[in-house]
Image (spheres, grey):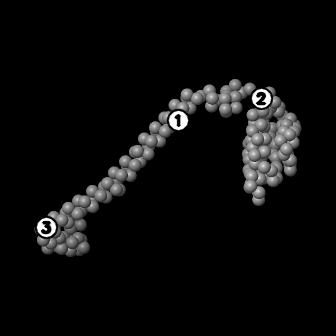
Amino acid sequence: MIRKLKENPSVTRLIARYDHLPKRDQQALKLMIVAVVLALVYFAIWRPVHNYHTDAVNARDHATELLAWMQQNREAIRSLGGGGTTGARAANQPANERELMATVTGTAREAGLNLQRFEPSGNNSIRVWLEDVPFGQVAQWLESLSSEHGILIDQAAMDRRGAPGVVSVRLTLAI
C-alpha cells in the first residue's frame, strides 16, 4: 500500500518538493506534522471520549443520589401516590358512572364552575368541557376531586383565552 502511495504522481511531487527543502525546513515540517496529528488525536478522539465518560459518571452519580433519596422517602412517596399498595378506595369515591357524573357536576357547582357540556365516556369515565374559566378555580376543583373523591384525570387539554389566567378546558375524568 505504501509502495502504491509512493507511485501516485501527486505524492511523488510532494516527496520531491520535500527532498529539495533545506534540512532545517524538513525538521520544521516534521515537527508541524507531529503537532497536527497530536491535535487531531486530542480533539477528535481523546476529548470527546473524556467528555462522554465525565457525563456518564455524573449521570450515574445523580441516579445513585436519586435512588438513595427515593429509598429514604419510600413511605412518603407511596402516600402521595394515592394510598400506596393497599388499593383501598376513598370514602367518597363514586362506585359507578352515574355517581361519578353526580359527584363531578355537584363539586363543579360548589366550586363556582359552570360545566358547558358533560357526557359519559366509556367505562367509569366522563368527559367534561368548561369554557372561559379561571385556571386557579379549575386547579382547585381538580385537586379536590382527586384528594376527596379519588377521581383521576385521564386526559386534559387546556387552551388559553384572551384574558390572563382564563382557560377553556376539556377533561376526561375516571374513577
Residue 169 is situated, as x and y percent measured from the top left of the image, at 78, 50
Q: Residue at x 21, y 72 (%)?
A: 14
**Residue 26, relative to residue 61: is it above or below?**
below
Q: Secondary structure at mark 2?
A: loop
Which quarter of the rendered picture does the N terminus lie within?
Answer: bottom left
Q: Residue at x 82, y 52 (%)?
A: 131
Residue that mark 2 sits on: 90
Q: Which comes sooner in the sequence, label 2 or label 3?
A: 3
Q: Secondary structure at mark 1?
A: helix
Query: Is residue 105 shown left or right of residue 56?
Result: right
Mark 2 and mark 3: span between their CA atoms? Answer: 89 Å
At label 2, which amino acid type do we have?
A: Ala
Query: Is residue 155 shown left or right of residue 30?
Result: right
Mark 3 and mark 1: span between their CA atoms? Answer: 60 Å
**Residue 42, relative to residue 27: is it above or below?**
above
Which quarter of the rendered picture does the C terminus lie within?
Answer: top right
Mark 2 and mark 1: span between their CA atoms? Answer: 30 Å
**Where is residue 111, by image quadrant?**
top right
Residue 86 is situated, as x and y percent measured from the top left of the image, at 70, 25
**Residue 88, relative to residue 29: is it above or below?**
above
**Where is residue 7, by image quadrant?**
bottom left
Q: Tag on residue 24?
A: 3
Question: Is residue 170 in sight in this rendering?
Answer: no
Q: Which comes sooner in the sequence, label 2 or label 1?
A: 1
Observer-nearest residue: 70 or 166? 166
Residue that mark 1 sits on: 66
Q: Secondary structure at mark 3?
A: helix
Q: Residue at x 80, y 50 (%)?
A: 133
Q: Which comes sooner in the sequence, label 3 or label 1?
A: 3
Residue 19 is situated, as x and y percent measured from the top left of the image, at 14, 71
